[in-house]
Amino acid sequence: MLNIAYRAAFAGALFSLAGPSLAQPIAVSPVASDAAADAQPVVQVPAAPASYTLPALFAVDLTVVDEVSSKLAKSGDPVRLRLARPIYVTPDLGLPEGTVVEGMVIHAAKGGMGGKSGELLIAAQRILLDNSVAIALRSFQVNPAQGRDNQGVAMGLMIAGGAVGGIAGMLITGGSARVAAGTNASAKTRSATELPASLLVKLPRQDPLYTSPMPVPAFTTQGN
């Protein structure tokens, strides 16, 4: 009997010693958790390009700001133009509608007696963004229905670039050749031009995108 009691007491002692240790939670080393976090890949966000290329022969829609007439104009007179539509160089960066465009009177001759027609040759020269960046233009044309003489008759004649010092312009003839304020016109970029991103403005987003920092065709709201 004493032997049985001794065995029961010995078993209880073993249970009291082993039980609490088995009930203890297993501690997780923080070192393993930190190592797993360090193993996660780091996503690199590419930096925005510093500049974009506007390609050569890119079509630009223009508006004539002030009337130009062969009665008053002289060779070398400035012609005020503006962008009729924005130029996009990314889906949301570019030059806004209304951007100033510089033009010039290349040749002007008044109409005379004996039916001599007035002559007016004007050209779009450039879009000046700052003192070091300008977009040179060529192939200026006005809407043929809007360049008129005083009798409502007009004729447009494209002049080769070499004939006017490398600036392609448009000759309007008539009794008093003139281009009215608000006349729609167009031109093209003369050569590919690097445009610093800092000189571009945020525009309403347009897709698809046809430009990148490489010299590929840019996207605009008008056709080329």
Image (spheres, rainbow, N blue to C red):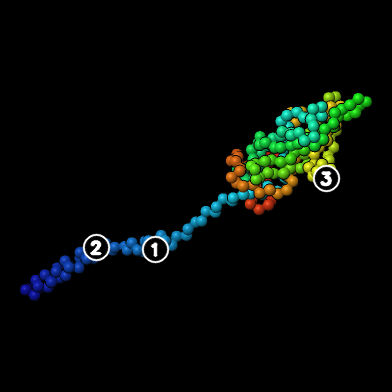
Residue beneath disc 1: 35
Sequence-wise, which precedes: disc 1 or disc 3? Answer: 1
| Mark 3: few/some/many CA within 10 Å (<14, 14-19, 20+) | few
Which residue is painted at 39% across and 63% down in the image?
35
Amino acid at pointer 2? Gln
Residue beneath disc 3: 162
Q: Quadrant of residue 67?
A: top right
Which residue is painted at 71% across and 33% down in the image?
80
Picture coordinates of residue 173, whole percent (x, y): 85, 31
Q: Nearer the viewer, mark 1 or mark 3?
A: 3
Q: Nearer the viewer, mark 3 or mark 2?
A: 3
Side (left or right) of 184 relative to 129 = right
Picture coordinates of residue 130, whole percent (x, y): 64, 42
| Mark 2: few/some/many CA within 10 Å (<14, 14-19, 20+) | few
Q: Could you tell me which quadrant the N terminus lies in?
A: bottom left
Picture coordinates of residue 106, whole percent (x, y): 80, 37
Residue beneath disc 2: 24
Q: Nearer the viewer, mark 2 or mark 1?
A: 1
Side (left or right) of 120 relative to 8 = right
Which residue is painted at 82% across and 27% down in the image?
71
Side (left or right) of 13 relative to 184 = left
* Residue 42 visible somewhere in the drawing: yes
Picture coordinates of residue 163, whole percent (x, y): 84, 43
Sequence-wise, which precedes: disc 3 or disc 2? Answer: 2
Alpha carbons under labels 2 and 1: distance apart? 25 Å
